[in-house]
């Protein structure tokens, strides 16, 4: 079992149907999110316990709980084939692949953007990547509970499986031979690869991409934070598909 901290993450875990053993709330908590946690938990028969703030803080072992946390099942991970299969009913499936994202706050923010964009799945690497922990859950504002996430040991093998299923691979990079991200035809199954905060996507990963894309930077800096860049590109994909 795992702990999920924060009002929004706990509420989203409930709404997603995640198996929750118990929810703990500190006395005196008020607000719309707290009210909804109580009502949604009651509908599903999830037990809620309340405690004094002192006892709550001693039990939670986390200073950023917003007065609530839940004991829930561990996150379920999927296989790449599961993501492919579940996206087959979509006209233009969209999957996000993360190549060695190491900062938990970046990972959480990326997962939030992915959930908002309605992606069909997220693939992340097992090695040299941030774990999906309580910080990621909190930063994603509960988006983790609504996403199909696969963890792979070899990103190249995952790319090969996606290509065999008809996906085109677009990698965001500052390297050579890139094109403006707005010029790509995204009206096809797309897997978007975002790379490590410092090094970007690895050379072999870039060599296996169908499109290498970048966001032009007319200002004084040559790159965006990876979580911001992910949101920019994802919503350009959605915009171009509706045009």
Image (cartoon, rainbow, N blue to C red):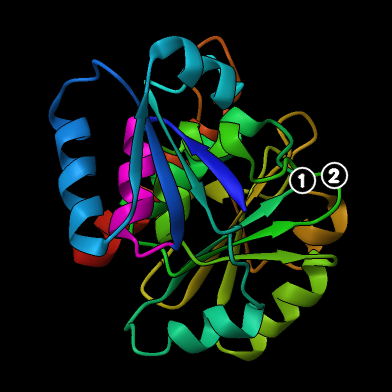
Looking at the picture, how far across and down is residue 220, in whole percent? 55, 9
Q: In front here: 125 or 179?
A: 125
Give the left or right position of residue 229, taking residue 125 as reference: left
Residue 183 relative to residue 148: left or right:
left
Which part of the image, by quadrant, shows the C terminus? bottom left
Q: Residue 234 magenta-drawn?
A: no
- Give residue 183's quadrant in the image: bottom left
Question: Residue at position x 77%, y 44% from top?
Answer: 129
Q: Nearer the viewer, residue 69 or 243?
A: 69
Classify 133 as above or below 44.
above
Q: Main secondary structure of the magenta part?
A: helix
> Which residues lie in the magenta part?
7-18
Mark carried by residue 100: 1
- Image location (x, y in percent) of residue 82: 57, 83
Q: Is residue 233 visible?
A: no
Question: Which residue is tagged 2?
Answer: 128
């Amino acid at each position: 079992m795992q702990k999920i901290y924060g009002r929004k993450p706990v509420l989203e875990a409930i709404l997603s149907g995640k198996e929750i053993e118990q929810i703990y709330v500190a006395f005196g908590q008020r607000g719309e999110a707290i009210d909804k946690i109580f009502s949604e938990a009651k509908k599903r028969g999830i037990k809620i316990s309340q405690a004094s703030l002192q006892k709550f803080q001693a039990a939670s072992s986390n200073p950023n709980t917003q007065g609530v946390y839940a004991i829930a099942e561990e996150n379920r991970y999927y296989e790449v084939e599961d993501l492919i299969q579940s996206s087959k009913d979509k006209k233009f499936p969209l999957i996000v692949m993360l190549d060695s994202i190491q900062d938990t706050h970046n990972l959480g923010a990326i997962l939030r953007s992915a959930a908002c964009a309605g992606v069909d799945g997220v693939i992340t690497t097992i090695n040299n990547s941030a774990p999906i922990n309580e910080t990621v859950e909190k930063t994603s504002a509960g988006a983790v509970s609504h996403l199909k996430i696969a963890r792979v040991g070899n990103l190249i093998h995952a790319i090969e499986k996606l290509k065999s299923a008809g996906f085109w691979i677009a990698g965001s990079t500052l390297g050579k031979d890139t094109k403006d991200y707005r010029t790509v035809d995204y009206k096809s199954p797309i897997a978007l690869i975002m790379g490590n905060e410092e090094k970007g996507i690895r050379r072999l990963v870039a060599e296996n991409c169908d499109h290498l894309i970048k966001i032009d930077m007319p200002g004084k800096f040559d790159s965006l934070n990876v979580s911001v860049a992910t949101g920019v590109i994802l919503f350009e994909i959605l915009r171009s598909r509706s045009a």
